[in-house]
Amino acid sequence: MDELLASLNRTLRGWANYFRHGVSKAVFSTVDDHAWHRIVRWIFHKHSRLSWRQLRRRFCRPGSWKLICDGVEFTGASSVKVIRYRYRYRYRGSNIPTPWTPRPAVANTGG
């Protein structure tokens, strides 16, 4: 299971890094929720006599529903910070630099 969690973490983190520049935090949460349910379904399929209480005791962090196995915790896509703008500074309105933006004429004060 630790290999599964590590592989899913890498895959979802890479996918989330690609899409992190959009408005995608809710989508990341939905994808993580789906992945968590699929992992739990896989655990129940593998350990058919397991109850929810036993699953939580064996495969989750104490006091939460975070899946963890041999020190590898399922972090998913929500661990990636969403950055709305790629650039260091936010450009808004007429401040967007384009090649068609007129530049003010430089006054020649030759004396």
Image (cartoon, rainbow, N blue to C red):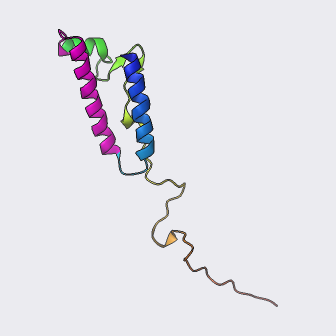
**Along the line of sight, which residue is nearer the eye, 39 or 68?**
39
Specify start and end residues of the magenta stretch as a single range. Answer: 25-52
Answer with left or right where residue 85 lies relative to residue 5: right
Q: Position of residue 11 (x, y in %)?
A: 41, 32
- In the rendered image, the quadrant that contains the N terminus is top left
Q: Quadrant of residue 81?
A: top left
Outermost residue toward the top in this view: 49
Q: Position of residue 4 (x, y in %)?
A: 37, 21
Residue sitting at x 30%, y 44%: 26
Residue 24 falls within the magenta-colored stretch: no
Answer with left or right where residue 94 lies relative to residue 109: left
Q: Position of residue 101 (x, y in %)?
A: 55, 77
In this rendering, is residue 72 above or below 90? above
In this rendering, is residue 95 above or below 17? below
How many numbered markers are drawn?
A: 0
- In the rendered image, the quadrant that contains the C terminus is bottom right
Q: Position of residue 62 (x, y in %)?
A: 31, 16
